[in-house]
Image: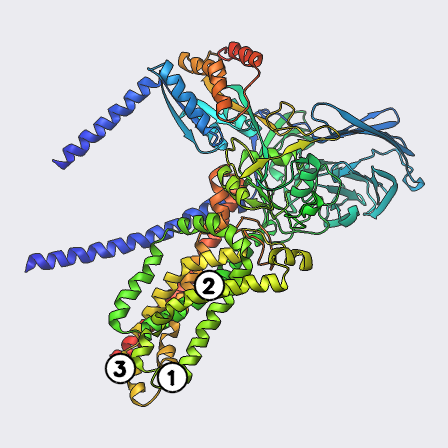
């Protein structure tokens, strides 16, 4: 009796799996970056309303999870907040059947955050390096540890700066270390918290905090600093000239020597369309320039 | 009857099977963790492969030669450096990118090299240190000139062995071949006030003069060709490995960071790929490491995502230190709360009241640690930071006040200290604790205004340069301590309560006081149990994760400062394991850390369990 039931269940499961495999032409899985999770879901929802037959599954567990999933064929689209490394690309160069299409879909500005009541409004890249780096790859000055070295203010006095950042596995950390620290070693007293939200929360409640985060920040307790370089005026994170902007990538797998399959191609074109790019800016990132997006959209499906 | 016996047997067998399963599960976890970490120690192997399939990344520095001049250039993201030198002069241009888009400011300079650097016709090698600000020029005589680009007149001279050839490895390391067959490894660094330093790390004497020395593109391995034999020098673990099986080699070249090409005497090309972890050794985990940019060898936990061209540092000491510091600080808060409560509930309290109070305290254990962590990080941390003086006041006032009441009650004599009152006294004075807390808080604030200019945090900064981080060891110890109290209480209370009542009653009948009978009769029997409680909670503090991830700040520091943060093994595993690339060196080192953690908690818990079983044995003997 029970045995029959279990058997029935297994058969049903097997049927379900084979059905899913058969349907894979219209179903897609997006795997990858945590930063891009919300945007991927918005895209998937908007795309499904225009293409009711499509089914899109979004899994967000970090950029590093995308390449293995793509190479194994368990996902068709990889979302990454950094570019694939040589060794990740090697997963595909050794693969006889699959190859990749890389598309930049927008930009993410890494914001420098301080507490809302902190009087500082702008900071230079060099000062950032002297605060965050121990071995200083580019800057030559002495290290900065106190707020009084940055700004004379009554509330901060000469308290120490409490730096906040992401752990080493995060793409934001890698970007910050290479661009701001010039590859130098970060000081060991940087507070590392697991997620963007945790850092924003911590900075909002600590007057002496100075943190960097990627992605969208909507919190009234923190303020984003402008960046100065040389003699020029401060650059805001929304400006094109903001130096801490990194491209965001989608990777599509396709069979070697062939074009993207129809549904994936339509999704890629949707992402680069006006509506798709509007969702990018709604999610707190900077969209591509319209001409760039159009040009990319024309090329994206070719083999 | 038979049926009942059958069921008895069946359940007995099931229990045995289940416990065997638990043992197997623990053992296999141990084995599993170990097998992931173990390949780190496997010896490096090489396998013949087909032609290169990886693209060789461009080296960070490029050196070229035109007629008599040596032209070199170096790039970083914000500096670009072009220079040329002949025998006596160095001139060049430093371009600094300060503006956002391609606006370079340039600095021309010309440095007359001192006469002792008059060169022979050998290749001049230049190392660039400290963000392209310092140029190091090794000379065959064994002098190393370090020139500060911004102050060209300042040339420091350091000494190395005189050499025949010199090659550069990664991260400020320099490999020197001297007296034909001696290879030595030097580390260049920049100390305080930008004073350059050079340290000799190791020396190897080879049997013959090598024909070719070749550093790998990422600068962590060197191939050495002697006659037709090839040696692999692992620069970070400092081991020389003889690669006999390669056959007769004539010329070597690297094709990627772990692949190299061998040209044999017969003119064949062969490709080999290295397997294993040539740059791992235990020294990296437990000894201070020399790295570029530091003035001394340091302990640092600085992992990196694989293949980004940086050099990770995997010192476990900061993590072990943080783990220990957190556990001791937690015990500092938990012991004075947990143990006296256990003594009171287990020895003084009437059984009826005990049955109500005990579950209430044990209910604390049901609070998930992530909740304690969240409350501590979000709600308590800012208040604790601002009201630190008030907190200190409470910390002093509560024990002092309670002790005062105790002294007062004792002085009043027998009437007040009678048994029925002792049983409930602490419950009666528990509202007093609240009052004491408020008084302590107000007193702390008052003292802050009187003696510390109204702001203790600022006073500490201005007077002693002690800066307090919000995520500090005191707050961490406090919140972790709260999580430990139920464990500490339950185990030690049970140990005390298990001591037969007749013994204490006998003492009382012979005229001793309650405290005397506790101290001289109950405590010696229950002591191993209390010790076990302390050990178990210590083990728990070592293994606790969520509170530490959220409250500790995860700063891998090694200091005695109670106002700074820490980073523990468990928090590191939680933060880094999910994104460490699978089966890479970082991943396996994390598993090794997990292995240490597992072994440590296993030992602590075993010792605790052994002491505890001793108590049970002793008490049953007494009862028997």
Q: Earlier in the sequence, mark 1 or mark 2?
A: 2
Left or right: B514, with B97 as reference point: left
Left or right: A249, with A44 as reference point: right
Q: Earlier in the sequence, mark 2 or mark 3?
A: 2
Circle number at residue B502: 3
Residue sitting at x 48%, y 54%? B596
Secondary element type, mark 3: helix
Circle number at residue B516: 1
**Observer able to see residue A11:** yes
State the CA–CA distance, disc 1 to disc 3.
15 Å
* Viewer-nearest residue: B361 or B275: B361
In the rendered image, the residue lying farthest to the right is: B115
Identify whether A72 is placed above or below B11: above
Circle number at residue B438: 2
Q: Residues within 10 Å of mark 2 (few under 14, many from 20)?
A: some
Secondary element type, mark 1: helix
Q: Where residue B380 sits: x, y (%)?
A: 47, 52
Is circle 1 on the same chain as circle 2?
yes
Q: Where residue B53 sits: x, y (%)?
A: 57, 24
Q: Mark 2 and mark 3 in contact? Answer it, CB < 8 Å.
A: no
């Amino acid at each position: 009796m029970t045995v029959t039931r279990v058997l029935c269940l297994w058969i049903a499961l097997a049927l379900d799996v084979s059905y899913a495999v058969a349907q894979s032409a219209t179903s897609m899985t997006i795997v990858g970056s945590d930063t891009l999770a919300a945007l991927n879901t918005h895209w998937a929802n908007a795309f499904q309303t225009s293409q009711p037959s499509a089914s899109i599954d979004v899994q967000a567990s970090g950029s590093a999870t995308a390449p293995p999933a793509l190479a194994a064929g368990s996902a068709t689209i990889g979302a990454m907040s950094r570019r694939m490394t040589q060794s990740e690309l090697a997963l595909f160069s050794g693969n006889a059947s699959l190859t990749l299409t890389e598309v930049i879909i927008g930009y993410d500005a890494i914001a420098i955050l301080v507490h809302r009541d902190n009087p500082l409004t702008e900071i230079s890249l060099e000062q950032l390096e002297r605060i965050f780096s121990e071995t200083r790859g580019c800057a030559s000055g002495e290290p900065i540890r106190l707020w009084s070295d940055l700004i004379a203010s009554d509330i901060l006095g000469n308290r120490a700066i409490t730096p906040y950042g992401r752990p080493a596995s995060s793409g934001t950390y890698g970007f910050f270390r290479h661009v701001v620290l010039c590859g130098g070693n970060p000081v060991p007293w940087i507070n590392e918290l697991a997620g963007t939200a945790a850092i924003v929360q911590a900075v909002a409640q600590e007057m002496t905090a100075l943190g960097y985060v990627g992605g969208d920040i909507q919190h009234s307790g923190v303020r984003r600093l402008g960046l100065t370089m040389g003699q020029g005026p401060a650059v805001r994170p929304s400006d094109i000239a903001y130096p801490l902007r990194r491209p965001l990538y989608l990777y599509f797998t396709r069979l070697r020597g062939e074009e993207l399959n129809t549904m994936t191609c339509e999704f890629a074109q949707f992402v680069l369309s006006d509506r798709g790019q509007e969702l990018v800016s709604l999610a707190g990132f900077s969209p591509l320039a319209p001409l760039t997006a159009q040009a990319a959209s024309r090329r994206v499906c070719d083999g | 009857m038979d049926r009942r016996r059958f069921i008895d047997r069946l359940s007995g067998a099931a229990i045995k099977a289940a416990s065997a399963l638990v043992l197997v599960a623990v053992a296999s976890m141990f084995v599993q963790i170990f097998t992931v970490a173990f390949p780190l120690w496997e010896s490096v192997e090489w396998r013949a492969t087909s032609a290169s399939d990886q693209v060789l990344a461009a080296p960070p520095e490029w050196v070229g030669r035109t007629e008599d001049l040596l032209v070199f250039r170096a790039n970083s993201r914000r500096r670009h450096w072009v220079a040329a030198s002949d025998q006596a002069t160095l001139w060049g241009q430093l371009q600094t990118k300060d503006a956002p888009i391609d606006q370079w400011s340039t600095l021309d300079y010309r440095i007359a090299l001192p006469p002792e650097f008059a060169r022979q016709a050998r290749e001049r090698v230049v190392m660039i240190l400290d963000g392209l600000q310092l140029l190091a020029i090794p000379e065959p005589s064994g002098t190393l000139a370090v020139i500060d680009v911004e102050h060209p007149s300042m040339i420091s001279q350091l000494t190395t062995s005189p050499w025949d050839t010199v090659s550069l490895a990664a991260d400020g390391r320099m490999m020197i071949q001297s007296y034909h067959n001696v290879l030595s490894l030097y580390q260049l660094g920049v100390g305080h006030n930008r004073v350059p330093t050079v340290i000799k790390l190791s020396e190897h004497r080879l049997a013959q003069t090598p024909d070719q020395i070749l550093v790998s593109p990422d600068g962590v391995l060197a191939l050495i060709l002697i006659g037709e034999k090839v040696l692999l020098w692992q620069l970070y673990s400092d081991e020389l490995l003889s690669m006999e099986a390669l056959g007769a080699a004539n010329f070597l070249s690297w094709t990627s960071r772990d692949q190299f090409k061998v040209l044999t005497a017969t003119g064949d090309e062969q490709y080999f790929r290295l397997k294993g972890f040539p740059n791992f050794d235990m020294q990296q985990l437990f000894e201070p490491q020399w790295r570029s940019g530091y003035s001394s060898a340091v302990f640092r936990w600085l992992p990196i995502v694989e293949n980004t061209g940086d050099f990770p540092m995997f010192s476990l000491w900061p993590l072990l230190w943080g783990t220990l510091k957190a556990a001791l600080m937690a015990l500092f808060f938990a012991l004075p709360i947990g143990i006296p409560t256990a003594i009171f509930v287990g020895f003084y309290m009437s059984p009826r009241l005990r049955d109500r109070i005990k579950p209430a305290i044990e209910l604390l254990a049901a609070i998930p640690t992530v909740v304690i962590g969240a409350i501590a990080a979000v709600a308590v941390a800012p208040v604790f930071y601002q009201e630190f003086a008030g907190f200190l006041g409470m910390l002093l006032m509560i024990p002092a006040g309670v002790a005062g009441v105790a002294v007062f009650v004792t002085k009043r004599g027998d009437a007040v200290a009678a048994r029925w009152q002792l049983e409930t006294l602490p419950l009666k004075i528990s509202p007093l604790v609240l009052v004491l807390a408020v008084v302590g808080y107000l007193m702390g604030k008052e003292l802050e205004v009187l003696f510390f200019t109204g702001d203790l945090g600022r006073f500490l900064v201005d007077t002693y340069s002690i800066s307090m981080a919000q995520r500090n060891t005191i707050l961490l110890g406090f919140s972790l301590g709260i999580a430990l109290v139920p464990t500490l209480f339950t185990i030690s209370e049970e140990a005390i309560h298990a001591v037969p009542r007749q013994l204490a009653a006998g003492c009382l009948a012979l005229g001793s006081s309650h405290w005397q009978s506790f101290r001289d009769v109950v405590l010696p029997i229950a002591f191993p149990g209390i010790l076990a409680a302390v050990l178990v909670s210590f083990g728990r503090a070592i293994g606790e994760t969520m509170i530490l991830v959220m409250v500790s700040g995860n700063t891998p520091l090694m200091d005695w400062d109670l106002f700074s943060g820490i980073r523990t093994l468990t928090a590191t595993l939680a933060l880094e394991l999910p994104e460490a690339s699978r089966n890479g060196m970082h991943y396996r080192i994390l598993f090794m850390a997990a292995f240490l953690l597992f072994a440590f908690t296993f030992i602590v818990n075993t010792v605790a369990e052994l002491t505890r079983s001793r108590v049970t044995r002793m008490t049953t003997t007494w009862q028997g």
